[in-house]
Amino acid sequence: MIRSSHARSLASLLALGAVSLSVSACPTPDVAGSCPTPPGATSQEALAILSSCFGSPGPSSPSISGKPDVDILFVIDNSTLMAPKQRQLAATIDNFIKKLDASGANYHIGITSTDIGAQTAQGVAFQPGNLNIPGCDSFRGTDGALQRTACRNRSQGTWSAEAKAACASLCPTTLEPGTGDVYLWKQDGATNAPNNDILGTLKCAAVLGDTGCGLVSPLEAAKRALDSHSTANSGFLRQNSILAVIFLTDEDDCSVQMTARAQNNPNTIDCAKSGMSTYNCWKNNFRCTANNLTCKEPMTTVGAKTGCVENNNGYLESIDKYVRFFSNLRSSSKIVLAGIWAPTLLDNLSSETTKVGKLIVDGDPLLCVPGPGITCPSDALIHGQGTNAACKSTTDASFVGQAQLRLSKFIRSFDTTARVEQSICEPQNYGSALDEVAERIVSKIPAHCLGARVKTDASGKAACVVGLVDSVNPSAVPKVALAQCSTSCCNAWAVAGATTTDPLTLTARPVPNDPTISAACTSEPGDCYCAVSNAGSKYACKDVAGQDTSLAGLWIKMAPHVPPAGQVASFVCF
């Protein structure tokens, strides 16, 4: 959020090096503050001197540790017709990774499919008729397990030609996470990707194929990937990390309640003729939509459906279940949810044919009687085809999306800063959508804010004692106090993310590996700190009353510019 209208360009703000830090960053010192800390004073002596000048330290002094943790989960539909979408996602992910790397985060990246199975019990086919749904002949599917296997090492016997081609193009050399890990990680510059090729390894894993269960269940799959119901994904989700979940699917969520799985039976009856309206009226690939929604028009006929709402008949899991799960997992300040999926019926409840997001029911042309007043058995009904689909790309006919309501209903239950939606039918925009997700992630990496504005002594030096301490005792008084950084370095911390149209400034963040800060602080003779106001930044530090406080900036000269393992920087400021 932009917190100040007093914007200046990055260059002019950094040029303020000649201006005293006490003017640009801190309020006028107390009259009693005319007692600067003498050179060579110990931390304890410095604290005693500052206490005599300024009284008790201010509130909420942070302990700054290493790089922030970011955990990213991709939930990728692996059902029929998804190969071109998987390929486009992987092909446009480069800049997403570059933005993550530029943020300085230590990150985990995991991939799971939307396949959680469909059978009522392990190894039990549907009865009667001993039938199974193609691709759904399992009880658990992948069960939310993270998928480390490169597409070249997957069984491709039943894959479409498009899926095989996507793998060959994106994964010319088999790359998989090392040491048996089920997810990719980057930690302080080191990775578990072969030859540190995060991008190549990610692209190899992202092509899951297109023979997964057609009852796509992205919400349940995402929950299972993160809820620790098994040990398969141990270590992926870290405590207090920023979490991002990115969905790729071309139809609505079909997370069936376990107690209702008998309704997945692929047998069908013609409800239009019988006058009935039960779950098995429809072929399975249309059943989730037809059985879950109540519209003004009957779901047993062809044509546009309007005013549709979920009927809560107990077939699908409640959206509230997943909203509660993710809300309890992370606060809005630490979560980003993104959906690359079809435009939603919520934005076109009248199913206007000229707008995306519509729900139009078609009939299988091989089973329906053509012509005026078309008749069609209900078990031959299908999602709208061609221009009747919820969306269709104007440049590539393979990018089609079916009407969805649940997915957007879910994601729109979260704060606008925590969500991104992009049409799956606009492949040219996948990259920009991923860029936006990366920017949302980076914007949630917290600046280290002090609880009040820092005072200064008569020389303009911030009234702080800062030093490295053992992380086991972060409130300890440091044995060695760090020097305050130069004015030019501290001004760079103060202006990072300044509210200006300068594109460099808009991407800058008050973190030590930010190019703006690195350029200004690299000439510092050693480790140092800043305690500055950043009121002109979109990351401005504020107290609960909305008043400006000060930003705690720590510059560790040795890359990656964060405290060594086992240490944190303790700030005690007045």
Image: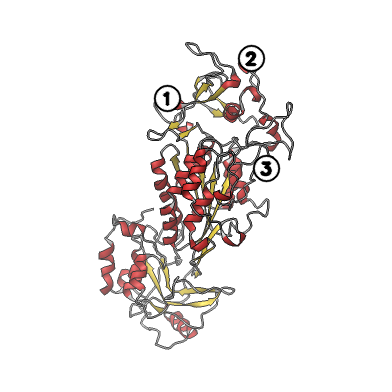
Measured Cα–Cα span from mark 3 to mark 2: 35 Å
Q: Residue 433 carries which label?
A: none
Mark 3 vs 2, N-terminal side: 3
Q: Residue 275 carries which label?
A: 2
Comparing 512 with 435, the one in front is: 435
Q: Is residue 340 visible?
A: no
Residue hosting label 3:
140
Q: Which amino acid does label 2 sit on?
A: Gly
Helix or strand or loop: what does disc 1 sit on? loop
Q: Residue furthest bottom?
A: 40
Q: In the rendered image, which quarter is residue 521 located in?
A: bottom left
**Neighbours of disc 2 within 10 Å: few (<14), some (14-19), many (20+):** few
Q: What residue type is labelled 3?
A: Arg
Q: Observer-nearest residue: 92 or 423?
A: 92
Q: Are marks 2 and 1 in contact (CB under 8 Å)?
A: no
Secondary structure found at label 2: loop
Q: Position of residue 26 (x, y in %)?
A: 35, 70
Name the residue beneath numbered marker 1: 352
Q: Sort mark 3 into few (<14), some (14-19) or many (20+) by Cα contacts within 10 Å.
A: some
Q: In which quarter of the image is residue 425?
A: top left
Q: Earlier in the sequence, mark 2 or mark 1?
A: 2
Q: Distance between the residues labelled 3 and 1?
A: 38 Å
Q: Nearer the viewer, residue 455 or 332?
A: 332
| Residue type marked 1 | Glu
